[in-house]
Image: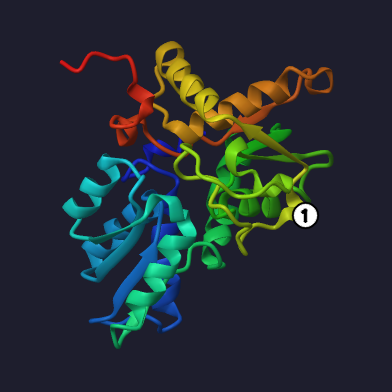
Amino acid sequence: KCEFFNPLASVKDRIGVAMIEAAETDGKLKPGTVIIEPTSGNTGLGLALVCAIKGYRLIVTLPDSMSTEKKKMLELLNAEVVLTPADEGMPGAISRAEDIMTKHEDTFMPQQFSNPANPEVHARTTAEEIWADSDGKVDVVVSGVGTGGTLTGIGQALKGRKPGFKMIAVEPEDSAVLSGDIPGPHKIQGIGAGFIPNNLDTELIDEVVKVKNEVAFEMARQVIKTEGLPVGITSGAAVAAAIEVAKRPDMAGKMIVVILPSNAERYLSTALTEGLSEE
């Protein structure tokens, strides 16, 4: 499922709109409110799109390890970017955002990791699109886990609709907290936040697949070269996991849908393009 066809080229555009609209409905936002959010980049971009249209001031905190393309696009959209140490990961970005909130009187933090509008929009839109486009034949959905919203929303919508339907979670091998390992630095930007988000309903997960950094990068390159789909790093991880699952005998004849969250052009400054000409 090619989520890079969204306006700002990622699955996070959905929650950017959903969280802002929910806050407006609930009276949490008004003219002059400063929106502050920690992000690995793409949620910040989704929020920046909405804030640019609606006229809200947006401050985002993100680890310095995130791609140059994300940082520049955020600035182009008039978001104020605050970088945090890469080795602190998303917890460091969250802590910095909370600190910034204390310096402003009227603030709102969407809190993508716990905001119920996140899984809700995926249950209402992403899941229904998968169901309709597959004519209800989908048997398995493979999704990377960042905030947990995509997996949770899809699982909530489809688990009770089809017996035997499975949700497969994908996480970085180097920060496999869903598998019970300790968090750590990794290069698969957008998943593997280093903690289990409140928005992730782990009861919906049938299996967790761990993917190595280099496997995610190489699979993304192969998808781009052989399928003509400009996928990002997390897409490479998800496709690698899906292929691993699809090879099993019990998966013969099953329809497996893979979430491709973002576009390769957001990662041209990363290891995704290693070996390519600089000219």
Counting from the top left corner in percent of width and height, residue 85 is at 36, 55
Name the kind of residue labelled 1 in the image.
Answer: Glu
| Quadrant in which residue 255 is drawn | top right
Left or right: 32 in relation to 17: left
Does the rendering let one see residue 13?
no
Left or right: 186 in relation to 4: right
Left or right: 190 in relation to 7: right
Q: Which residue is at 41% across, 38% downward? A: 262
* Residue that protrudes farthest toward the bottom in the picture: 105
Left or right: 135 in relation to 261: right
Q: Which residue is at 39% across, 50% downward? A: 86
The residue beneath circle 1 is: 203
| Quadrant in which residue 50 is drawn | bottom left
179 vs 51: above or below: above
Of residue 75 and residue 142, the one placed in the foreground of this image is 75
Q: Which residue is at 58% across, 29% downward? A: 212
**Crowding at mark 1 (Cα within 10 Å: few <14, some 14-19, many 20+):** few
Quarter placement of the C terminus? top left
Counting from the top left corner in percent of width and height, residue 21 is at 40, 69
| Quadrant in which residue 175 is drawn | top right
